[in-house]
């Protein structure tokens, strides 16, 4: 954070929390700090609507300039001739898991690594492929949208057309639901024209559900067979690429000729190994968020009487929160991994924040910025256990208003301790992977509330 000067004498401190899920605000008193706490939530609610996928749209002058940019291809992907060298067999990152993975993926585990080479590379045993038959490839957006998704479509389309102009790229409209229903849109130059270098997934739309049930897997298999697809490209994060791996195994077992490819497009930045240097979209997300956080830091320093709680994207991994911390220098960041490893409770987190507020107050600093990932709520052990009980009851068909009476004694005590708005959000039906609807749970508002109560107790 920028250097700080002494606050204006008598200026009352505030607590302010931000998130990116709704567009509401509320103001309520904070007697423990002799001031006010403000809750401001950014981001408009999304209304259901029929989208005209693939239809050219009007671009602003800035968007037109952005659309004119042509990313540079690496040398190994330039031209019409493909040079590839096959290396060692793929292996599990942890060798102790190799047997288990091989047992569940007998058809796809251990395939050789493929290294693409530039034209000037001198590799004796490299295969040179200069003739490319026409291909039919389908692609689908899955998971949460991330910057760069449209450019993946653009790059795939260009590659197919360069190698054979008769190749066809089909986009599944509406994400995985479009895949199951075989609802497609053929990608053309005209369709792509106004989506190049533009954010969002609105070219085709997307879904966030997993492809996990037998009916869904069979629907995907039938779609690829009926459409005579040579390849299926799944664009998404960890969950979506897990689906891609499972589909590839299922297709191989069923002797389906469609090859399944997963592309790591995720804002969480949690899909990396020695072969994946970075996830598409992570860098953009962090830079945009860091700029906004820096603006908030400047505002806090200017007024010298506000504390901001800012919730960022990040479910299992806190990479976005950590990277934004390194770029924008807030006063505190709470990492989900540290909370889980240290088994910190809600009370522990509240105490740490209040201790920091009091320490800064002794230095005549009545302002600050605190970052936290959206997955923090599931990293707190007792809350995670509570969510597991709630989700189990919801999947058994128990109505939301009957949940509390069927919780275990300790879970009931924790549930009743929480403020009403958090209770309502914890009772939301879980995602398809059994995780909570984290984007709908206002963890930053919960922490602001608990800090208010604790500061009131300390100063009374």
Image (cartoon, rainbow, N blue to C red):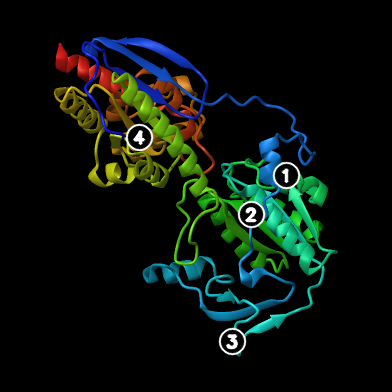
Q: Quadrant of the N terminus?
A: top left
Q: Nearer the viewer, mark 3 or mark 1?
A: 3
* Mark sitting on residue 371: 4
- C-alpha gap between disc 3 and disc 1: 43 Å
Q: Secondary structure at mark 2?
A: strand
- C-alpha gap between disc 1 and disc 4: 37 Å
Which is nearer the N-term, disc 2 or disc 3?
Answer: 3
Residue 355: x, y in percent? 18, 28
- C-alpha gap between disc 4 and disc 2: 32 Å
Q: Residue at x 52, y 24 (%)?
A: 22
Q: Secondary structure at mark 4?
A: strand
Give the class, few, some or many, for how many residues have Cα within 10 Å of label 4's Cα (few <14, many ≥20).
Answer: many
Which is nearer the N-term, disc 1 or disc 4?
Answer: 1
Q: Secondary structure at mark 1?
A: helix
Q: Nearer the viewer, mark 1 or mark 4?
A: 4
What residue is shown with label 1? 178
Q: Nearer the viewer, mark 1 or mark 2?
A: 2
Residue 345 lies in quadrant = top left
Q: Secondary structure at mark 3?
A: loop
* Mark sitting on residue 234: 2
């Amino acid at each position: 954070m920028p250097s700080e000067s002494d606050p204006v004498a008598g200026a009352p401190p505030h607590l302010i929390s931000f998130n990116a899920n709704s567009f509401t605000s509320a103001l309520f008193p904070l007697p423990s700090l002799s001031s006010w706490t403000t809750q401001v939530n950014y981001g408009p609610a999304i209304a259901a609507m029929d989208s005209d996928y693939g239809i050219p749209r009007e671009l602003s002058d800035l968007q037109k300039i952005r659309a004119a940019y042509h990313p540079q291809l690496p040398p190994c992907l330039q031209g019409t001739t493909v040079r590839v060298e096959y290396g060692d067999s793929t292996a599990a990152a942890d060798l102790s898991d190799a047997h288990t993975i091989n047992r569940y993926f007998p058809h796809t585990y251990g395939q050789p690594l493929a290294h693409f080479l530039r034209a000037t590379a001198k590799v004796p045993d490299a295969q040179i492929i200069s003739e490319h038959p026409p291909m039919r490839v389908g692609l689908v957006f899955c998971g949460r949208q991330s910057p760069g998704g449209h450019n993946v479509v653009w790059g795939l389309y260009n590659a197919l057309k360069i190698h054979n102009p008769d190749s066809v790229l089909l986009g599944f409209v509406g994400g995985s639901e479009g895949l199951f229903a075989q609802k497609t849109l053929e990608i053309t130059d005209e369709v792509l024209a106004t989506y190049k270098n533009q954010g969002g997934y609105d070219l085709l739309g997307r879904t966030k559900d997993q492809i996990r049930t037998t009916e869904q897997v069979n629907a995907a298999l039938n779609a690829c067979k009926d459409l005579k697809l040579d390849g299926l490209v799944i664009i998404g994060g960890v969950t979506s690429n897990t689906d891609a791996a499972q589909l590839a195994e299922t297709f191989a077992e069923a002797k389906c000729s469609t090859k399944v490819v997963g592309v790591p497009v995720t804002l969480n930045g949690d899909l990396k190994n020695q072969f994946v240097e970075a996830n598409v979209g992570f860098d953009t997300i962090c830079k945009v968020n860091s700029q906004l956080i820096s603006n908030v830091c400047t505002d806090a320093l200017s007024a010298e009487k506000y504390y901001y709680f800012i919730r960022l994207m990040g479910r299992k991994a806190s990479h976005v929160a950590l990277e934004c911390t390194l770029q924008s220098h807030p006063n505190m960041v709470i990492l989900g991994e540290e909370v889980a490893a240290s088994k910190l409770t809600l009370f522990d987190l509240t105490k740490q924040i209040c201790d920091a507020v009091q320490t800064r107050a002794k230095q005549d600093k009545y302002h600050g910025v605190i970052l936290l990932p959206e997955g923090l709520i599931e990293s707190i052990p007792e809350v995670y256990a509570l969510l597991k009980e709630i989700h189990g009851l919801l999947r058994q068909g128990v109505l939301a208003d009957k949940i509390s009476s069927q919780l275990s004694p300790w879970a009931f005590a924790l549930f009743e301790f929480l403020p009403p708005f958090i209770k309502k959000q914890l009772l939301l039906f879980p995602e398809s992977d059994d995780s909570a609807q984290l984007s709908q749970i206002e963890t930053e508002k919960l922490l602001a509330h608990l800090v208010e109560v604790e500061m009131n107790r300390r100063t009374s």
